[in-house]
Amino acid sequence: MKVGIHSIAFDIPQLYLPITTLAEARNIEADKLIKGLGLLKMSFPDVHQDVVTMASNAALKLIRQENIKPNEISRIYVGTESGVDSSKPVGSYVLSNLESVLGEGSFRNCDVVDLTFACIGAVDALQNCLDYIRLNPTKKAIVIASDNAKYDLNSTGEYTQGAGAIAMLITANPNILSFSNAVGVATEGVFDFFKPRRAVSKATITTSDENPEWQGVLENEIAIYKEQPVFDGQYSNQCYINRITEAYEHFKTESEQQGKIYENWTNILMHLPYCFQGRRTFIEIFAKENPELLAAQIGETDKDKLKALAKSSEYLSLVQAKIQPSEIASGQVGNIYTGSIFLGMLSTLCYHYQQKTNLAHQKLGFIAYGSGSKSKVFEAEVATEWQSAIAKVKLFEALEACQAIDFPTYEKLHKKELKTAVIQPSKEFYLDSIEKENPVLIGARYYKYGL
Ligand SMILES: CC(C)(COP(=O)([O-])OP(=O)([O-])OC[C@H]1O[C@@H](n2cnc3c(N)ncnc32)[C@H](O)[C@@H]1OP(=O)([O-])[O-])[C@@H](O)C(=O)NCCC(=O)NCCSC(=O)C[C@@](C)(O)CC(=O)[O-]
C-alpha cells in the first residue's frame, strides 16, 4: 500500500519587502543578496497575522479544496518553532479556528499536537503521520508546517526572513507523492541556532520581544522569550553540511542502496533557509560521490578545489535540472522554517506542472535539516494523478499577486508598532486581540474569521 501526500494548500502573507529595499537601507551590496544568496523578496506577516492564522488558513483551504468532512480527519499534527504558548499547542488554536467556521465540536475526536525541532519539526510530523496511516489506511491526517522566520534587525539573518504555512493531507493511495519507509537520520546536540528563554536588560527590551515573562531574574533584567533566535550563521552552515552528509550516508544503509543515489532523483528537495543554501551545500555530497571530478579541479587547498567544482559544468547542470525548480518560490518568500522544504517541493511540482513535464513515477529526494541539529534524508515517488492535484495549487500566481511594503512599514511591523493592518483581512483567519484584563485568561489569543 502506498502512503503519502494526497493534497496540498498554503498560506503566505501577502506583504513582502523587496530585498533591494533592505540592501539599500542596510548598506549591503544588493548583488551579495541576489547573486550570492539568491534572495529577491521576503514575505512578512501583517499586523493581524501569526503562526496560528497562517496554519488555520492553510488547513481551511485544504479542507475546502478536498471537500473533506471534519470527522474524516483523525489527526492534525503541526510542525512549528514559532509557537505562541509553551503549553497550549498551535494545533489547538487551529482546531478551534476551524470549528468556528465548520461547526462547534466538529473536530472533537481529532488528535492534535505540535512537534518542535527547529526547521525539521514538520518532517517529523509528516513521518509520524505516515506511520499512522500505514497502520490505519482508512484514516486521514493533516500535517501543517507554519512559521514566522523572524530575525533581529541588523543581524545577518535579517535578509533570510520569511513567513508562511503549508498544509498537507496524508492518506493511503495518495494523488501527489508516496513515501518509502527508509529514512536516513543524523543528530547532534549543538547550539547553532536556538531560541532560549534568556535574561535581557530592561533597558534593551523592545516591542518586538513578544511574550515577556517577568520573572525577576536580576534587579535590572527580566527573563524573556524572544521570537528571534540566537544563532551563529557560519557555524550553522557547517552543522547543516555535517548533518546532511551524515544523513545521506545513513540513508544508503537504511534503503540498502549504493552508489550515486542522487542520480535516481529527478529533483532534490532540501531545507532552504535561504534560496541558494541547497546548491551551496549539495556540492559537499556531489564532491564525495565524484572524487575524480574533485581531484581534477585546480586549486591549492581542498576548499579551493570544492569551490572550483561548484562552478564546473557538471555541477551547474545538476543544479539547473535538480535543485533550481525548488528555489523559485524560496527566492520570492524567504525562509519559512518548518515549511521551507515543503515550499521547495511545491515550487518544484508547480514548475513541472507549468512545463508540462511528465513526472509520474519519478523519484524525488528529500534532504531535511533542523538546527539544534538533525537531518533526515528520504525518498518519494510521484503519483500518476499528480497533475490534477497540483492544478488546484496556484502557488506562483499567488506570489505574483503579493504587495511590496516600504522600509519604514517593514520596521514598524517588525517592532510591532503598527496598530492597523496594511491589508484588511478578508475571507481569512486573523488575530483579533490578546487578553490583557482577565487574570485567568491573561495572554489568551482570540482569533476571528474575516467576512
Ligand atoms: C546564511 C548566512 C550565514 C550567510 O552569511 P553572510 O555572512 O551573510 O554571507 P557570506 O559572507 O557567507 O556570503 C554569501 C555568499 O555571497 C557571496 N557574495 C558576496 N558578495 C557578493 C557579490 N557582490 N556578488 C555575488 N556574490 C557575492 C559570497 O562570496 C558568498 O558565496 P561563497 O563565496 O560562499 O560561495 C547568513 O545569512 C545567516 O546568518 N543566516 C541565518 C542562519 C542561516 O540561515 N543558516 C543556514 C544554515 S542553518 C539552517 O538552515 C536552519 C535554520 C536557519 O533554517 C533554522 C532552523 O532550523 O530552525
Image: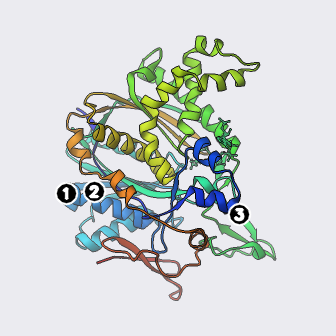
* Picture coordinates of residue 422, whole percent (x, y): 46, 75
Q: State the SS at label 1.
A: loop
Of the image marks 3 and 1, the number of the one nearer the N terminus: 1
Residue displayed at 34% across by 59% down: 58
Q: Which residue is nearer to you in this view: 232 or 414? A: 414
Q: Which residue is nearer to you in this view: 89 or 354? A: 354
* Tag in front: 3 or 1: 1
The answer to whether mark 2 is within 8 Å of ligand 1 is no
Q: Is residue 354 left or right of residue 218?
A: left
User: Which residue is labeled 2 in the image?
Assistant: 62
Which quadrant is home to the N terminus?
top left
Q: State the SS at label 3.
A: strand
User: Which residue is labeled 1 in the image?
Assistant: 68
Q: CA distance from mark 3 to mark 2?
A: 38 Å
* Picture coordinates of residue 306, whole percent (x, y): 65, 23
Residue displayed at 41% across by 38% down: 325
Task: In the rendered structure, find residue 198 and report the number of the disc placed on it.
Answer: 3
